[in-house]
Amino acid sequence: MFKSCVDEKAATELLKALVKIDSVNPTLVPGAKGEEEIAEYVANWLRGLGLKAKVDKIEAKRANAVGTLKGVGGGKSLMLNGHIDTVGYDYMTIDPLKPVVKEGRMYGRGTFDMKGGLVASLAALKAVVDSGTQLKGDVVVAGVCDEEFASIGTERVMEKTRVDAAIIGEPSALQIERCHKGFAWIDVETKGLATHGSMWETGVDAIAKMGNVLTGLEAIGVKLQKKKHPVLGPASVHAGIIKGGLELSTYPDKCLLQIERRTIPGEERKDVEAEVEALLKGIADKDLKFKASYEITFYRGPMDVPETADICQTIVACSKEAIKLTPAFIGGSGWMDTQIMWEKGIPAVAYGPAGEGAHAAVEWVDLDSVVDAAKVQELVIRRFCGEK
């Protein structure tokens, strides 16, 4: 019978320590501190467990903490991944860097998104070490930067790391998030001809020309609603930002529309490109003065790890045994670092605690769920990597 070695008090104190460290993503908030300090803290904590750990500095203010618990050989390898950056906190209604525990919840920036999930993984690792268990396979632990923007942290880790499966401790309320949508950011620019506002014979209004693009975009959105993923639902598209015009008395020479297209498993970048090209060509065929170009400025694919994957079934079995809970398989509309691993053929799922307030004025994590997530991951490490 499984008996957990998770140290609940130590886990709570570790989470407090991490919340106190300002690790706001400097890409989101210019001048913010970034992740170097918290990466150093996590690396030192891992070294305290006897792991070989390093701080990998990617650029100014940006760093990962990566450590490995080496197995004796003959087992599968597992990555425990969690992001150490947070969004800004100027609008929070409580002190973001002074964690407060009240009625089983810890409040503060990053408690939910996602220092609580990272602590669950770290507490699980500590429990395995404290138990004296010798593993066959390796456990790689990565505290990564920049998940809140471009995920340069996990991108760096995956340049050299290969494992058999991965768990990201993103909050999932102790359910298994095995799939999520992807997204494309698209710039569409229409061309006009700038002339004096009185010269209607020669002026071409780039903003007005964008009108047909917007109408076409709405039609695409309606069409997308008809094709649904069984867990994630339909894909979607929306106009996010529009810019154009020089001055009130001048025909605008260009108009920029920035679009976000959310994709579902089965859709690829080429599908998005074909969709936009067909839209612009269809308008141009009917309007000889319509001139437009587009660019996909950023793309992240969707992911869909099957429920039958070894890591999925291991978490189910370990959850039943460790905390007497049969987890559900869920999906997310938001994108996660799991996709970076899945793209390289590594089954990766999100599994973490419960709470609320990601990016919000009030943020909290349920401490019992942090401990429960740690207990499940402790058993997953033993079962997935194998015990000598």
Image (spheres, rainbow, N blue to C red):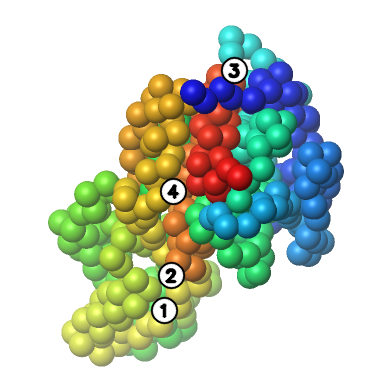
- Asked if marks 4 and 3 touch (Cβ < 8 Å), the reply is no
Instruction: Kindly report the distance in space between the C-alpha atoms of the residues bearing marks 1 and 2.
Output: 7 Å
Residue at image mark 2 = 186
Q: Amino acid at mark 1?
A: Tyr
- Give the residue displayed 66% in from the left and 43% down from the top: 134
Q: Secondary structure at mark 3?
A: strand
- Give the residue displayed 66% in from the left and 52% down from the top: 71
Is 106 positioned to the left or the right of 32 in the image? left
- Residue 82 at x, y = what percent? 61, 46
Q: Quadrant of residue 186?
A: bottom left
Instruction: Kindly report the distance in space between the C-alpha atoms of the residues bearing marks 4 and 3.
Output: 29 Å
Q: Secondary structure at mark 2?
A: strand
Q: Residues within 10 Å of mark 3 (few under 14, many from 20)?
A: some
Which label sits in the foreground, 4 or 1? 4
Q: Is residue 188 visible?
A: yes
Q: Amino acid at mark 4?
A: Ile
Residue at image mark 1 = 294
Earlier sequence position, callout 4 versus callout 3 = 3
Locate the C terminus and report the quarter of the image it occupies.
Answer: top right
Instruction: Kindly report the distance in space between the C-alpha atoms of the residues bearing marks 3 and 1.
Output: 47 Å
Q: Secondary structure at mark 1?
A: strand
Instruction: Kindly report the distance in space between the C-alpha atoms of the residues bearing marks 3 and 2.
Output: 40 Å
Residue at image mark 4 = 311
Earlier sequence position, callout 4 versus callout 1 = 1
Instruction: Kindly report the distance in space between the C-alpha atoms of the residues bearing marks 4 and 2.
Output: 35 Å
Q: Secondary structure at mark 4?
A: helix
Which label sits in the foreground, 4 or 2? 4
- Give the residue displayed 37% in from the left and 82% down from the top: 292
